[in-house]
Amino acid sequence: MGKCVGILALQGAFIEHIQHLEKCITENKYDLSVTTVKTPEELEICDALIIPGGESTSMSLIAQRTGMYPHLLKFVHDPSKAIWGTCAGLIYLSKELSNEKELVKPLNLLKVKVKRNAFGRQAQSFIKDCDFSSFIPDCTDFPTVFIRAPVIETILDPQEVLPLYTLDNGLIVAATQGKNILATSFHPELAENDSRFHDWFIKKFVLKQL
Ligand SMILES: NC(=O)CC[C@H](N)C(=O)O
């Protein structure tokens, strides 16, 4: 039976992730299914989990109030699962927050210290063409969306966490940990009609073909 990719749907931009994944599955005939995850039963059937962008404070509070927190904690710490956090998802996966941390109880997985809203507020959001060809073949011009984005301020375990993409000013905005964890401070799910990032995630982290 094919693997199942879950998208945490407590809060935030989960629909866009589903649309990209379904496009990749249809176009490449991957033996994969996609499901939203709001309950422990939905999480149980997943081999991978994407934690979307949104608001990490809200996501954290909802996870605690609905009783999902311990289930998420167990799932993301299982090394057989593929995990990807985008923006608020990156914050929620991290071990340490350097600011605005009062109401967030993170999943304590990604061995980094993260700064929330590192580029300022909503008005300072931006889209930038980024060259991801060092890890996605021929992807030199990915329309990369940053919305009140965090940055990885410190890598706490350089043996395990590798920077994947760094902006010209030296800020780390994407990283991997081991072979199963990906974190991006930007939103590949908001790239219109461009599913190259999702396709790479499927191939490298879910199907482990790369
Ligand atoms: N686009 C986003 O996911 C924003 C993240 C938000 N600024 C937070 O701190 O949770």
Image: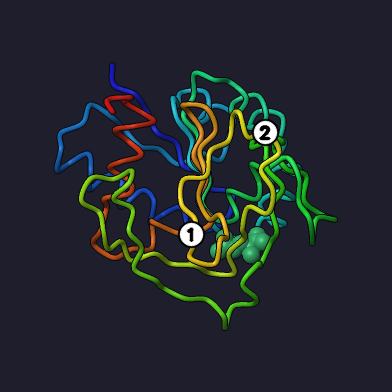
Quarter of the rendering containing residue 117: bottom right
For the image shown, how many numbered marks are present on the structure?
2
In this view, the mark in front (1 or 2): 2
Q: Amino acid at mark 1?
A: Phe
Viewed as shown, does residue 133 lie left or right of 97?
left
Q: Is residue 34 left or right of residue 119?
A: left
| Outermost residue to the bottom | 123
> Picture coordinates of residue 64 (x, y %)?
75, 42
User: Is the residue indicated by label 1 positioned so its CB lies within 8 Å of ligand 1?
Assistant: no
Residue behind mark 2: 157
Classify mark 2: helix, strand or loop.
loop
Q: Quadrant of ligand 1?
A: bottom right
**The N terminus - image quarter:** top left
For disc 1, the marked residue is: 186
Circles 1 and 2 in contact, beta carbons < 8 Å? no
Residue at 55 percent across and 56 percent down: it is: 87
At label 1, counting other C-alpha atoms closer than 10 Å, the crowd grade (few under 14, some 14-19, many 20 or more) is many
> 161 or 74, which lies in front?
161
In the rendering, at what x and y percent does residue 150 appear? 62, 60
At a point 32% along the width and 35% down the height, the residue shown is: 202
Identified at 23% across, 62% down, the residue is: 193
- The amino acid pointed to by label 2 is Asp
Name the mark on residue 151: none
Determine whether the residue tagged by mark 1 lies in a helix, strand or loop: loop
Q: Earlier in the sequence, mark 1 or mark 2?
A: 2
Q: How is the image coloured?
A: rainbow
- Residue 127 falls left or right of residue 156: left
* Label 2 Cα crowd, 10 Å radius (few <14 / some 14-19 / many 20+): few
Q: Quadrant of residue 119?
A: bottom right
Q: Residue 141 in the image: x percent, y percent?
A: 27, 63
In percent of the image, x 58 and y 54: which residue is there? Answer: 11
Question: Which image quarter holds the C terminus?
Answer: top left
